[in-house]
Image (tube, grey):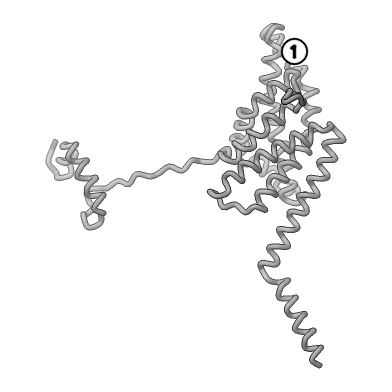
Amino acid sequence: MADDQNNANGASDLEHKVNDKSSKSFMRKAFDMTFNLAMAAGTTALGYLTVGPAAPIVSAAFGGGGLIGALWKKKETGRPLDDILNSALKTYSAVNTVFYPMTLLGNATYPAAASAGSALLGSQYGSFIGRSAWALTGFNMAFVAAFKAAYHLYENKLNPQGIGKSIADNFVPFATRIGTVFAPGYILAANGIPDLSLGGYKVPTFAVNAIPTGIYNELNPPGQKKKTQSIPSYSSQTTQSQLTPQQIQNMQNYYARNQGAAGQLAGVPA
C-alpha cells in the first residue's frame, strides 16, 4: 500500500515538473537549439557539395560576425545567450542555403552587366563599372531577399507562412546597409577577385568582408531609429511649486541673458 502511494506521489511530481513553466521553457530552448544545429549541419553539406568550402567559410564569417557583435552588446541588451547562438546558427544556415543560387545568378548576369557598361562607357572602364553597379544594386537586392526568405524558414521551423512579409519587413534599410558595408566584397568578387591572400592562405573575398559586416549590423541594426533625448519646455503657466530648484535656476539664467523673453513672460513688450 505504501509502495503504491509512493509511486503515485512520484508520478505526480514528474507530471508537475513536466507541466512546470521552467521545464517547458527549457524543453523549448533545447528543441530550438537542436533544430538549428541540425539545419546548420544540413546546409553545410549543401553548401560544400554545390560550391565547395567557400560556402561554409563565408557563412561562418557572416554568422560569426553577428555572434561577436551580439556578445559585445549583450550587457546593454540583456539578450539571452541561447537566443544569440540560435540567431548566429540561423544566419549561417541561411547564407549556406542561398550561396549556390546567388553564384548561379552572378554567373548569368555579370557578363551582361559588363557588356552594358562597355557599350555605354567604353571598354576601358565600362566593364568594371557595369559589373560593380549591378553588384551593388540588383544583385544585392536579390541576395537580401533570398537571405531574408531563408532566414524566415529557419526562424519558423521551415514553415513558409508569412515569408513575403518577412522579406518586405525593413527590406530597404537592410539592403542599403548590406550594399554599403559589403561593397568591397561585392565589387572585388564581381570583377574576378573571388579570393584574397591572407597570411599565405587564400580566403574568400566575401568572408573577409562578412565578419565586420556582421559585427556592425549587430551593433547598429539597420533601420533602427536612434533615441533622442527630449528637452523639456516650461510654459508661463508653470508655477514655481511645480519646478525643481535646478529648473528654476536654469530659467532664471535664461531670462537674465534674454531680457526680451523675460519681458514677454511678465507681459511687458520688449
Query: Which corner quadrant of the image does residue 131 belong to?
Result: top right
Mark 1 closeness class: few <14, some 14–19, many ≥20 residues within 10 Å: some
Q: Quadrant of the C terminus?
A: top left
Q: Quadrant of the N terminus?
A: bottom right
Name the residue at the front extreme. 199
Residue 107: image location, x then y, percent: 80, 23
Q: Secondary structure at mark 1?
A: helix
Name the residue at the bottom extreme. 1
Instruction: Decide: is 161 above or below 255.
Output: below
Residue 247: image location, x then y, percent: 26, 49
Residue 86: image location, x then y, percent: 70, 49
Query: Which sits in the foreground, 124 or 263?
Result: 124
Q: Which residue is mark 1?
A: 115
Report the amino acid beneath label 1: Ser
Residue at x 70%, y 65% (from the top left corner):
24
Residue at x 76%, y 50% (from the top left corner):
36
Instruction: Decide: is 226 above or below 110.
Output: below
Residue 235: image location, x then y, percent: 25, 48
